[in-house]
Every structure is written in structure tokens, then in C-alpha cells.
Amino acid sequence: MLNAQVWLLALADLREVARNRWTIVAALGFALVSASLTLAASAGGSEGFGPAAAGLINIELIAVPLFALIVGALAFVRDRERGTYAYMRALPITLRELYVSKWITVAAQVSAVVLAGFAGAFAAMSLAGVSGGDVGGAVQFAALTWLLAIACAAIGIGISTAVSRSPTALGAAIAAWLLLVIFGDLGVMATALVTRMNVSVLLALTSVNPAEAYKIASVAALSGSVDVLGAGGRLAADTFGAGVMPIMVAVLLAWTLAALFAGWRFLSRRSDA
């Protein structure tokens, strides 16, 4: 599947991405915010990365999914509106090759932004003189943030294959972001209050949300325990035990694979495919 044509298409898209000011501004902004939070929280050098973790988790739960969803949602829609998609379909390439190359481009774009953010955080950690143990937790945290970004980008790709206009794609991406990041917890809690939901079911519904899975796994990576999340964290620890981290990672991977599969199904069934 990853033949020369796929990489040539991806490289052509990546050259355009490299000239995209929005991506550059997003990367620089994420790096600056991450570095500022880390440096401010670790100014004394003795506290390490821990005090910056809460702020970074909250920032990334808001910014990373939104950016990834929008980038993914515009992937195919933008090409359709500019006529590039029709031109690409006229070339001797398969629809599968086009889909894979577009996914590589989107994944590379969001990965670059996440990498820039944590490059800033690690630079600040170096300036603050944090310990090696903190660096290990930060590396796991960065990997989890990348998985969240990839999962949300895949969801965005699914949106992009299902709609035809940029305003619709942007609206759907923002709606997905609100559902996953803002309303997900509120909806589950409201349902639990109305239906007197069993706590195990409540935990399951919370855990399948990629944003919540990311938060639980990040806290586990940075603190070694999810008890700091309160009663919910203790329930997760009691239910999943040592499997908390692998299960949350599996949730993020499952969302990525499911969204990519759905996107392929939408694209292959379109009349203009």
C-alpha cells in the first residue's frame, strides 16, 4: 500500500503544508505556551515537571484535539473546492493510494505541532534543571498527547470524507470537539444522575471517550497513580489495576483505526470517488 506513488503524493502535500502559515503559527504558539508553563512551574528546579503537568494537560485537552480535528476535516474538502481532488482522480493512482497519502500528510502535520510543543517543554525543563525521572514521565506524556492528536486527526479525516463543503466540515469538527472535550463529561454525568447508572457502566462510558482516556493515562504516566483524580480515579485503579495505561492507550488506538476505516468507507461510497 505504501508504494512510491503514495509517498510522492504525501510529499507534494507536505510541501504545501510547510508553506502554510496557520500550521507554523500553531506550532510556534504551542511551543511557546508549553515552554512558558513548564518554565514557570519549574522555576526553582526542585519541583520538576509535575507542577506544570496539570496546566499542560488542560491546555492540550483543549488545543490539540481542536487543531487535529480541523486539519483532518479540511483534508479532502479543501481539495474538492479547489478542484485538486478531481485532478488527482484523473491521474493513474488508486483511491486507496490517495486516501493513504492524505492520511500521512495530516498525521505528519499534527505530529509536527505536537513535537514543537514538547520541544519547547523539554527545553524549558532543561533550563529549569528537572530530574531524569521527570523527563521519563514527560516523554510518556508527550507520546500520549501524540496518540490523542492522531486519534482526533483520524476522526477529522472521517468528517472530511463525508461532507463536501468547508463550512460544513468546520462545523462538524467543532461539534465533535465540543462533544468529546466539553460536553462528554457533562452528558455522562447528567445521564448517570437521571438513570442512576451503575458506577462500573459510568466508568466504561467515561473511558471510551478519547479525551478522558488521554487524561487518565496522562495522570497515570506523570504521577504513577490515577488516585489524584478523586473517587473516579480510585474506581479506575480498582477496576483496571495495573492495566490502566494499556487500556487507555488501546482506546486511543481503537478510535484511530475505527475513524480511518469509517473514513475509507465514506470516501469509497461517494458518487464523486
Image: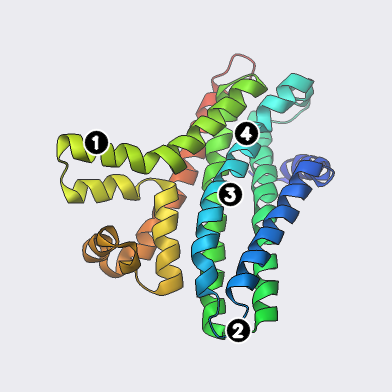
3D distance between C-alphas at marks 2 and 1 = 44 Å
Q: Quarter holding the N terminus?
A: top right
Mark before the other along the chain sequence, 3 or 1: 3
Q: Residue at x 43, y 57 (%)?
A: 215
Name the residue located 70 percent from the left edge and 66 percent from the top edge: 120
| Residue 88 rendering spot, x and y as whole percentages | 76, 26
Measure the C-alpha gap from mark 1 to mark 4: 40 Å
Instruction: Indicate which disc, 2 or 3, sits on the residue closer to the N terminus.
Output: 2
Mark 3: which amino acid?
Val
Q: CA distance from mark 4 to mark 3?
A: 27 Å
For the residues bearing labels 1 and 4, Cβ distance under 8 angstroms: no
- Please name the residue that numbered disc 4 is placed on: 96
In this rendering, does residue 159 appear at all? yes
- In the rendering, which numbered label is found on residue 8? none
Dot 1: what SS? helix
Q: Which mark is residue 45?
A: 2
Q: CA distance from mark 3 to mark 1?
A: 27 Å
Q: In terms of secondary structure, where does tag 4 sit?
A: helix
Q: Is residue 229 above or below residue 50?
A: above
Amino acid type at image mark 4: Arg
Q: Residue furthest top?
A: 271
Q: How many marks?
A: 4
Q: Report whether residue 261 is seen.
A: no
Q: Does 52 sit left or right of 199 as displayed?
A: right
Q: Nearer the viewer, mark 3 or mark 1?
A: 1
User: Which residue type does callout 1 highlight?
Assistant: Thr
Q: Which residue is mark 3?
A: 64
Residues tagged 2 and 3 counted as in contact (Cβ below 8 A): no
C-alpha span from label 2 to label 3: 27 Å
The tag earlier along the polypeptide, 2 or 4, is 2
Q: Position of residue 43 (x, y in %)?
A: 63, 78
